[in-house]
Image (tube, rainbow, N blue to C red):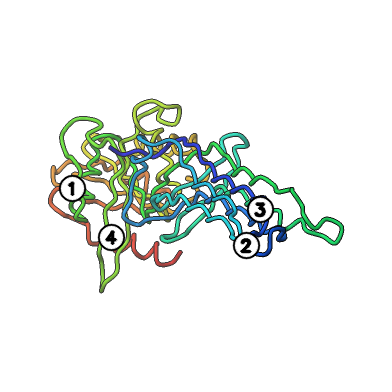
Amino acid sequence: MFVDYVEVTVQGGNGGDGLISFHREKYMPKGGPDGGDGGKGGDVVLVVDENLSTLQDFKYKKIFKGENGGRGGPNNRYGKNGEDAIIPVPPGTIVKDLDSEETLADLSEVGLQFIVVHGGRGGKGNARFKSPTNQTPRTATEGEEGEYRDISLELKLLADVGLVGLPNAGKSTLISRLSSAKPKIADYPFTTLSPVLGIIKYGDYKSFVMADIPGLIEGAAEGKGLGINFLKHIERTAVLLYLIDITEGNSETVFNQLRGELGKYNPALLEKPFLIALNKIDTGIKDDEGLRYFDGQGMECFLISAAVGTGLDELVNKLSNIIEQR
């Protein structure tokens, strides 16, 4: 199951209490104060894990808490610090505070760590309160409570190329042809029910990542179909590839429909570099009117067949050139 949004509660561990204690040993019945400080509570730490690609694990656990710190001990012994709660998240996870709606972190780099809440400080033992005027203090402080937050985790996939098209445009066929990704392929809408990432290799040891999102339909930006759930996954891409089924004979209309949905969702998407690929030319069907439109607008358009591989080398070369220049 692909899960890209969850809400969870995180709480730092409480600090341990300080101790009231007095030194006792043979021949020293009235030793001085020796109560130790309490240990610090554990933090809650998010860590980016490259082996994760979904937030699915958070569907089954909603509360994460650092370990409480230990109480201070006699002979000025510090209490044990609480263990941190380490939470692995996939690259591209955005962390927000649900109350303030503030973005706390954008965890896009593998290995990056972020302390989302801190554990409380330990309390002070009575040894801390000894003074010339108070040789036998009977005061200690309690440990502080750990920080508490309700947060959201939202995954935005990290990809170089965002593949945009209507259902059945051939996106799954294209990404399976270009990479080792194996999305489900069939002749009915919404075969792809979750984003698919494919690694496209080119040149000598070079590659880029292409994201195939479920097909858009009119009204996707308002929540129709599946598109609204996945449009966010193309926000980080360097270039968009509009894939259009040439057999429909209305390439210009489809292109403007796709652009319209992206613009309604996030106008910044319209500022990204893009290419157009007219797919299924192996059928022998042409759309001369559409080609004239794209040419007249100065838009670069590629004639391809994802099914048999026609024109894909030229398309990949152009995509890689755009990516390398950014």
Mark before the other along the chain sequence, 1 or 2 = 2
Q: Is residue 240 left or right of residue 198?
A: right
Q: Quadrant of the N terminus?
A: top left
Mark before the other along the chain sequence, 2 or 4 = 2
Q: Residue at x 49, y 34 (%)?
A: 264
Mark before the other along the chain sequence, 3 or 1 = 3
Q: Residue at x 41, y 60 (%)?
A: 110
2 or 4: mark nearer the eye: 2
Name the residue at the right extreme.
133
Q: Which amino acid type corresponds to the residue marked 4 in the rendered image?
A: Val
Q: In the image, residue 69 lies at what x, y percent? A: 54, 50
Residue 257 falls in which quadrant of the image? top left
Q: Is residue 241 left or right of residue 73?
A: left
Q: CA distance from mark 2 to mark 3?
A: 13 Å
Give yes or no for contact between labels 2 and 4 (Cβ–Cβ under 8 Å).
no
Give the crowd class for mark 2: few <14, some 14-19, many >=20 residues within 10 Å.
Answer: few
SS at badge 3:
loop
Q: Which residue is mark 1?
A: 182
Q: Which residue is mark 3?
A: 21
Q: In the image, residue 94 lies at what x, y percent? A: 49, 46
Q: Which residue is mark 4?
A: 316
Q: CA distance from mark 1 to mark 2?
A: 74 Å
Between residue 305 and residue 249, name the one nearer to us: 305
Q: Which amino acid type corresponds to the residue marked 3 in the rendered image?
A: Ser
Residue 212 falls in which quadrant of the image? top left
Residue 25: image tag: 2
Is residue 91 shown above or below 262?
below
Q: Which amino acid type corresponds to the residue marked 1 in the rendered image?
A: Lys
